[in-house]
Protein backbone atom coordinates (compact mmCIF):
# COMPACT_ATOMS: atom_id res chain seq x y z
CA UNK A 1 0.00 0.00 0.00
CA UNK A 2 1.36 3.38 -0.89
CA UNK A 3 2.50 5.70 1.86
CA UNK A 4 0.25 8.63 0.93
CA UNK A 5 -2.84 6.43 0.93
CA UNK A 6 -1.60 4.73 4.06
CA UNK A 7 -1.32 8.00 5.93
CA UNK A 8 -4.77 9.12 4.85
CA UNK A 9 -6.34 6.07 6.48
CA UNK A 10 -5.19 6.91 9.96
CA UNK A 11 -7.82 8.44 12.20
CA UNK A 12 -7.15 10.10 15.48
CA UNK A 13 -8.37 7.20 17.60
CA UNK A 14 -5.82 6.15 20.17
CA UNK A 15 -7.24 2.61 20.41
CA UNK A 16 -5.88 1.90 16.94
CA UNK A 17 -2.34 2.58 18.03
CA UNK A 18 -1.90 0.76 21.34
CA UNK A 19 1.74 0.13 22.20
CA UNK A 20 3.10 -3.29 23.02
CA UNK A 21 2.05 -4.70 26.37
CA UNK A 22 4.91 -4.88 28.82
CA UNK A 23 6.41 -1.55 27.78
CA UNK A 24 7.68 0.47 30.72
CA UNK A 25 4.83 2.55 32.18
CA UNK A 26 5.12 6.30 32.02
CA UNK A 27 6.27 7.59 35.44
CA UNK A 28 3.61 9.52 37.32
CA UNK A 29 4.69 13.13 37.36
CA UNK A 30 3.46 16.55 36.36
CA UNK A 31 3.67 17.26 32.61
CA UNK A 32 3.63 20.96 31.79
CA UNK A 33 0.91 21.98 29.33
CA UNK A 34 1.96 25.00 27.26
CA UNK A 35 0.27 27.03 24.55
CA UNK A 36 -0.48 24.63 21.65
CA UNK A 37 1.66 24.99 18.56
CA UNK A 38 -0.99 23.83 16.07
CA UNK A 39 -4.73 23.35 15.72
CA UNK A 40 -4.48 19.95 14.01
CA UNK A 41 -2.18 16.94 13.57
CA UNK A 42 1.56 17.67 13.37
CA UNK A 43 3.64 15.96 10.67
CA UNK A 44 7.16 17.17 11.38
CA UNK A 45 9.42 18.96 13.85
CA UNK A 46 13.06 20.10 13.51
CA UNK A 47 15.48 22.09 15.65
CA UNK A 48 16.41 25.58 14.48
CA UNK A 49 18.63 26.52 17.45
CA UNK A 50 19.21 25.04 20.91
CA UNK A 51 16.11 26.96 22.11
CA UNK A 52 13.87 27.09 19.03
CA UNK A 53 12.05 24.36 17.14
CA UNK A 54 10.01 24.52 13.93
CA UNK A 55 6.95 22.39 13.27
CA UNK A 56 4.38 21.91 10.53
CA UNK A 57 1.26 19.89 9.94
CA UNK A 58 -2.32 19.67 8.76
CA UNK A 59 -3.18 23.28 9.64
CA UNK A 60 -0.76 24.45 6.89
CA UNK A 61 1.20 26.62 9.33
CA UNK A 62 4.96 26.67 9.88
CA UNK A 63 5.40 27.51 13.57
CA UNK A 64 8.60 28.59 15.34
CA UNK A 65 8.39 27.79 19.05
CA UNK A 66 10.60 28.54 22.05
CA UNK A 67 10.27 25.07 23.53
CA UNK A 68 12.14 25.67 26.81
CA UNK A 69 9.78 28.52 27.74
CA UNK A 70 6.65 27.13 26.10
CA UNK A 71 6.06 30.20 23.91
CA UNK A 72 5.16 30.60 20.26
CA UNK A 73 7.58 32.95 18.49
CA UNK A 74 6.26 33.15 14.95
CA UNK A 75 3.81 31.51 12.57
CA UNK A 76 4.22 31.45 8.78
CA UNK A 77 1.24 30.90 6.47
CA UNK A 78 1.65 30.40 2.74
CA UNK A 79 0.94 26.79 1.81
CA UNK A 80 -2.48 25.76 0.53
CA UNK A 81 -2.24 22.18 1.84
CA UNK A 82 -0.61 20.43 4.79
CA UNK A 83 3.11 20.66 5.59
CA UNK A 84 4.88 17.33 5.06
CA UNK A 85 8.55 18.03 5.88
CA UNK A 86 10.79 20.81 7.19
CA UNK A 87 14.50 21.54 7.24
CA UNK A 88 16.67 24.37 8.52
CA UNK A 89 20.11 25.61 7.60
CA UNK A 90 22.12 25.44 10.79
CA UNK A 91 23.62 28.73 11.91
CA UNK A 92 21.07 30.76 9.94
CA UNK A 93 17.47 31.88 10.34
CA UNK A 94 16.31 30.11 7.15
CA UNK A 95 13.51 27.53 7.20
CA UNK A 96 12.33 25.36 4.30
CA UNK A 97 8.86 23.79 4.27
CA UNK A 98 7.63 21.08 1.88
CA UNK A 99 3.94 20.57 1.32
CA UNK A 100 1.23 18.45 -0.21
CA UNK A 101 0.56 21.51 -2.41
CA UNK A 102 3.63 20.37 -4.49
CA UNK A 103 5.82 23.33 -3.48
CA UNK A 104 8.65 24.17 -1.10
CA UNK A 105 8.74 27.61 0.51
CA UNK A 106 11.68 29.35 2.17
CA UNK A 107 11.11 31.52 5.24
CA UNK A 108 13.42 33.82 7.20
CA UNK A 109 12.79 34.08 10.92
CA UNK A 110 14.43 37.52 10.91
CA UNK A 111 12.04 38.94 8.33
CA UNK A 112 8.27 39.26 7.93
CA UNK A 113 5.89 36.35 7.54
CA UNK A 114 5.95 36.24 3.73
CA UNK A 115 8.02 33.50 2.03
CA UNK A 116 11.35 34.79 0.69
CA UNK A 117 11.66 32.12 -2.01
CA UNK A 118 9.41 29.56 -3.70
CA UNK A 119 10.46 26.31 -5.37
CA UNK A 120 7.80 25.10 -7.81
CA UNK A 121 7.87 22.28 -10.35
CA UNK A 122 7.00 19.00 -8.67
CA UNK A 123 3.82 17.34 -9.90
CA UNK A 124 2.84 15.62 -6.64
CA UNK A 125 3.36 16.01 -2.88
CA UNK A 126 6.91 16.90 -1.82
CA UNK A 127 8.10 14.51 0.92
CA UNK A 128 11.81 15.30 1.09
CA UNK A 129 13.79 18.51 1.54
CA UNK A 130 17.44 19.05 2.49
CA UNK A 131 19.96 21.92 2.28
CA UNK A 132 23.53 21.54 1.04
CA UNK A 133 26.32 21.95 3.63
CA UNK A 134 27.30 25.34 2.16
CA UNK A 135 23.71 26.61 2.12
CA UNK A 136 23.64 27.33 -1.61
CA UNK A 137 21.57 24.40 -2.93
CA UNK A 138 18.31 22.72 -2.01
CA UNK A 139 17.42 19.10 -2.72
CA UNK A 140 13.77 18.02 -2.94
CA UNK A 141 12.09 14.67 -3.55
CA UNK A 142 8.49 13.90 -4.41
CA UNK A 143 5.93 11.18 -4.99
CA UNK A 144 6.16 12.20 -8.67
CA UNK A 145 9.26 9.88 -8.81
CA UNK A 146 11.67 12.79 -9.16
CA UNK A 147 14.59 14.28 -7.26
CA UNK A 148 15.36 17.93 -7.96
CA UNK A 149 18.29 20.22 -7.18
CA UNK A 150 17.65 23.96 -6.81
CA UNK A 151 19.68 27.14 -6.53
CA UNK A 152 18.45 28.68 -3.29
CA UNK A 153 19.18 32.30 -4.16
CA UNK A 154 17.42 32.31 -7.54
CA UNK A 155 14.87 29.52 -6.97
CA UNK A 156 15.95 27.96 -10.28
CA UNK A 157 15.76 24.20 -10.76
CA UNK A 158 19.27 23.12 -11.75
CA UNK A 159 18.72 19.37 -12.15
CA UNK A 160 15.83 16.92 -12.31
CA UNK A 161 16.10 13.14 -12.36
CA UNK A 162 13.09 10.84 -12.55
CA UNK A 163 13.27 7.13 -11.70
CA UNK A 164 10.27 4.87 -12.18
CA UNK A 165 8.54 3.93 -8.88
CA UNK A 166 10.90 6.14 -6.85
CA UNK A 167 8.17 7.67 -4.69
CA UNK A 168 10.43 9.65 -2.36
CA UNK A 169 9.63 9.55 1.36
CA UNK A 170 12.62 11.39 2.89
CA UNK A 171 15.89 13.10 1.94
CA UNK A 172 19.13 13.66 3.90
CA UNK A 173 22.20 15.58 2.77
CA UNK A 174 25.34 13.92 4.18
CA UNK A 175 27.13 16.60 6.26
CA UNK A 176 30.27 18.03 4.67
CA UNK A 177 29.88 16.05 1.45
CA UNK A 178 28.29 16.08 -1.99
CA UNK A 179 26.22 12.96 -1.25
CA UNK A 180 22.46 12.84 -0.68
CA UNK A 181 20.53 9.87 0.70
CA UNK A 182 16.84 9.28 0.01
CA UNK A 183 14.29 6.67 1.03
CA UNK A 184 11.42 5.53 -1.13
CA UNK A 185 8.10 3.74 -1.26
CA UNK A 186 9.78 1.20 -3.57
CA UNK A 187 11.57 -0.04 -0.40
CA UNK A 188 15.05 1.00 -1.55
CA UNK A 189 17.58 3.58 -0.37
CA UNK A 190 19.50 5.56 -2.96
CA UNK A 191 22.66 7.64 -2.65
CA UNK A 192 23.01 10.55 -5.08
CA UNK A 193 26.00 12.64 -6.15
CA UNK A 194 24.89 16.28 -6.16
CA UNK A 195 27.57 17.20 -8.73
CA UNK A 196 26.38 14.81 -11.45
CA UNK A 197 22.82 14.34 -10.16
CA UNK A 198 23.17 10.60 -10.67
CA UNK A 199 22.58 7.67 -8.32
CA UNK A 200 25.93 6.32 -7.13
CA UNK A 201 24.63 3.51 -4.90
CA UNK A 202 21.37 1.66 -4.34
CA UNK A 203 20.97 -0.32 -1.12
CA UNK A 204 19.34 -3.78 -1.15
CA UNK A 205 15.57 -3.42 -1.04
CA UNK A 206 13.92 -3.97 2.32
CA UNK A 207 10.66 -5.89 2.70
CA UNK A 208 8.62 -2.79 3.54
CA UNK A 209 8.40 0.88 2.51
CA UNK A 210 11.28 2.96 3.89
CA UNK A 211 9.78 5.96 5.67
CA UNK A 212 12.69 8.02 6.99
CA UNK A 213 16.49 8.25 7.19
CA UNK A 214 19.18 9.93 9.29
CA UNK A 215 22.96 10.28 9.10
CA UNK A 216 25.32 9.84 12.07
CA UNK A 217 27.38 12.86 13.15
CA UNK A 218 30.61 11.19 11.96
CA UNK A 219 28.92 10.31 8.64
CA UNK A 220 29.85 6.64 9.03
CA UNK A 221 26.34 5.28 9.40
CA UNK A 222 22.83 5.65 8.01
CA UNK A 223 19.57 4.85 9.78
CA UNK A 224 16.37 4.01 7.93
CA UNK A 225 12.93 3.03 9.19
CA UNK A 226 10.18 0.80 7.81
CA UNK A 227 6.45 0.83 7.70
CA UNK A 228 4.56 -2.32 8.69
CA UNK A 229 1.61 -3.84 10.51
CA UNK A 230 1.18 -5.95 13.65
CA UNK A 231 4.90 -6.07 14.33
CA UNK A 232 5.76 -7.24 10.80
CA UNK A 233 8.27 -4.78 9.35
CA UNK A 234 8.15 -1.73 11.66
CA UNK A 235 11.93 -1.88 12.23
CA UNK A 236 14.77 0.61 12.00
CA UNK A 237 17.95 -0.47 10.21
CA UNK A 238 21.56 0.64 10.68
CA UNK A 239 23.69 0.70 7.52
CA UNK A 240 27.40 1.34 6.98
CA UNK A 241 27.75 4.31 4.60
CA UNK A 242 31.40 3.42 3.98
CA UNK A 243 30.24 0.10 2.52
CA UNK A 244 26.95 1.01 0.88
CA UNK A 245 24.41 -1.77 1.24
CA UNK A 246 26.14 -3.29 4.28
CA UNK A 247 23.50 -3.82 6.97
CA UNK A 248 24.93 -3.52 10.50
CA UNK A 249 21.91 -3.96 12.79
CA UNK A 250 18.12 -3.98 12.97
CA UNK A 251 16.03 -2.50 15.78
CA UNK A 252 12.81 -4.49 16.17
CA UNK A 253 10.02 -3.99 18.69
CA UNK A 254 7.49 -1.47 17.38
CA UNK A 255 4.04 -2.84 16.56
CA UNK A 256 3.13 -0.35 13.84
CA UNK A 257 4.97 1.72 11.23
CA UNK A 258 8.23 3.22 12.47
CA UNK A 259 7.77 6.73 11.13
CA UNK A 260 11.04 8.30 12.30
CA UNK A 261 14.49 7.21 13.41
CA UNK A 262 17.46 9.29 14.57
CA UNK A 263 20.92 9.14 16.07
CA UNK A 264 20.86 10.55 19.60
CA UNK A 265 23.51 13.31 19.95
CA UNK A 266 26.58 11.51 21.35
CA UNK A 267 27.62 12.05 24.93
CA UNK A 268 31.29 11.34 25.83
CA UNK A 269 31.76 8.23 27.92
CA UNK A 270 28.32 6.77 27.15
CA UNK A 271 27.15 4.17 24.61
CA UNK A 272 25.91 5.37 21.24
CA UNK A 273 22.10 5.50 21.19
CA UNK A 274 19.37 5.45 18.55
CA UNK A 275 15.79 6.69 18.95
CA UNK A 276 12.67 5.74 16.99
CA UNK A 277 9.02 6.79 17.03
CA UNK A 278 6.06 4.89 15.73
CA UNK A 279 2.39 4.88 14.86
CA UNK A 280 2.02 2.64 17.94
CA UNK A 281 2.31 5.80 20.12
CA UNK A 282 5.72 4.86 21.51
CA UNK A 283 9.27 6.21 21.43
CA UNK A 284 12.06 3.68 21.89
CA UNK A 285 15.71 4.15 22.85
CA UNK A 286 18.14 1.55 21.50
CA UNK A 287 21.77 0.66 22.01
CA UNK A 288 23.19 1.48 18.57
CA UNK A 289 25.75 -1.32 18.63
CA UNK A 290 23.86 -4.21 20.26
CA UNK A 291 20.37 -3.25 18.95
CA UNK A 292 18.98 -3.86 22.46
CA UNK A 293 15.88 -1.83 23.32
CA UNK A 294 16.86 0.08 26.46
CA UNK A 295 13.65 1.99 27.13
CA UNK A 296 10.13 2.44 25.77
CA UNK A 297 8.00 5.49 26.49
CA UNK A 298 4.33 5.23 25.57
CA UNK A 299 2.39 8.46 25.07
CA UNK A 300 -1.18 7.31 25.60
CA UNK A 301 -3.75 8.93 23.32
CA UNK A 302 -1.14 10.59 21.12
CA UNK A 303 -1.92 8.59 18.00
CA UNK A 304 0.93 8.17 15.51
CA UNK A 305 4.26 9.68 16.61
CA UNK A 306 5.60 10.80 13.28
CA UNK A 307 8.71 12.93 13.85
CA UNK A 308 11.61 13.31 16.29
CA UNK A 309 14.06 16.19 16.71
CA UNK A 310 17.13 16.20 18.97
CA UNK A 311 17.64 19.46 20.86
CA UNK A 312 20.69 18.48 22.89
CA UNK A 313 22.07 15.31 24.48
CA UNK A 314 19.24 15.21 27.02
CA UNK A 315 16.19 16.64 25.18
CA UNK A 316 14.09 15.29 22.32
CA UNK A 317 10.99 16.73 20.71
CA UNK A 318 8.33 14.39 19.35
CA UNK A 319 5.45 15.30 17.01
CA UNK A 320 2.09 13.54 17.31
CA UNK A 321 -1.20 13.43 15.44
CA UNK A 322 -3.44 13.93 18.47
CA UNK A 323 -1.60 15.67 21.31
CA UNK A 324 0.75 18.21 19.73
CA UNK A 325 4.48 18.37 20.42
CA UNK A 326 6.03 16.51 23.33
CA UNK A 327 9.23 17.53 25.09
CA UNK A 328 11.06 14.44 26.33
CA UNK A 329 13.97 14.28 28.79
CA UNK A 330 16.56 11.60 28.01
CA UNK A 331 18.65 10.37 30.92
CA UNK A 332 21.75 8.79 29.39
CA UNK A 333 22.87 7.12 32.60
CA UNK A 334 23.82 3.47 33.09
CA UNK A 335 20.20 2.61 32.25
CA UNK A 336 18.83 5.22 29.81
CA UNK A 337 15.29 6.43 30.39
CA UNK A 338 12.79 8.82 28.77
CA UNK A 339 10.39 11.11 30.61
CA UNK A 340 7.75 13.40 29.17
CA UNK A 341 8.39 16.94 30.50
CA UNK A 342 5.91 19.09 28.57
CA UNK A 343 3.51 19.14 25.67
CA UNK A 344 2.48 22.02 23.48
Image (spheres, rainbow, N blue to C red):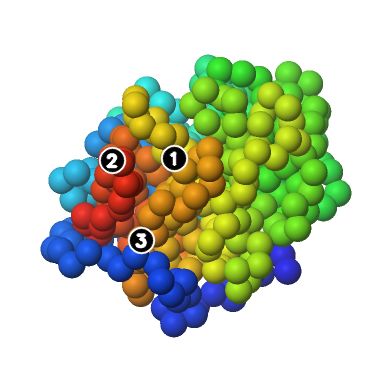
Position of residue 282 relative to residue 107, above or below, is below
**Residue contact at pointers 3 and 1, CB within 8 angstroms:** no
Residue 102 visible in the displayed image: no
> At 82% from the left edge and 52% from the top edge, which residue is drawn?
165
Q: Is residue 210 left or right of residue 322?
A: right
Q: Secondary structure at mark 1?
A: strand
From the image, state whether disc 1 or disc 2 is nearer to you: 2
> At 73% from the left edge and 19% from the top edge, which residue is drawn?
195
Q: Is residue 18 left or right of residue 64?
A: right
Measuring from the top left, give residue 133's x and y in whole percent: 53, 21
For the C terminus, which image quadrant? bottom left
> At 46% from the left edge and 48% from the top edge, which residue is drawn?
286
Q: Give the mark nearer the N terminus: 3 vs 2.
A: 3
Which mark is on residue 241? none
Instruction: Return the residue at label 3.
Output: 297
Instruction: Return the residue at label 2.
Output: 333
Instruction: Return the residue at label 1.
Output: 273
Q: Secondary structure at mark 2?
A: loop
Please identify the quarter of the rendering in which residue 264 is found: top left
Measuring from the top left, give residue 146's x and y in whole percent: 76, 43
**Residue contact at pointers 3 and 2, CB within 8 angstroms:** no
Q: Is residue 277 left or right of residue 126?
A: left
Position of residue 173 relative to residue 207, above or below, is above
From the image, state whether disc 3 or disc 2 is nearer to you: 2
- Closest to the observer: 329 or 272? 272
CA gap between label 1 and label 2 equals 12 Å
- Closest to the observer: 303 or 235? 235
- Closest to the observer: 325 or 85? 325
- Closest to the observer: 79 or 330? 330
Measuring from the top left, give residue 11's x and y in whole percent: 50, 78
Amino acid sequence: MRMGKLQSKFRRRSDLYKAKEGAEPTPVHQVEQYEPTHTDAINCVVSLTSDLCVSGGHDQAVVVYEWRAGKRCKSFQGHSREITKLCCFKGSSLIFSASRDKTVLMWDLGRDTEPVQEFCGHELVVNGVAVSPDGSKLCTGSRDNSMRLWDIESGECLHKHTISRNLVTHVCWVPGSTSIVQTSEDKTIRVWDSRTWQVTNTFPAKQYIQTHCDISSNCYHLLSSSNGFGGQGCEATLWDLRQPGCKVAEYRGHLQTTACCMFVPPRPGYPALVASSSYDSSVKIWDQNTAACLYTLTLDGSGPLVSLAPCDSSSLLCASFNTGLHQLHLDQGAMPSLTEVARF
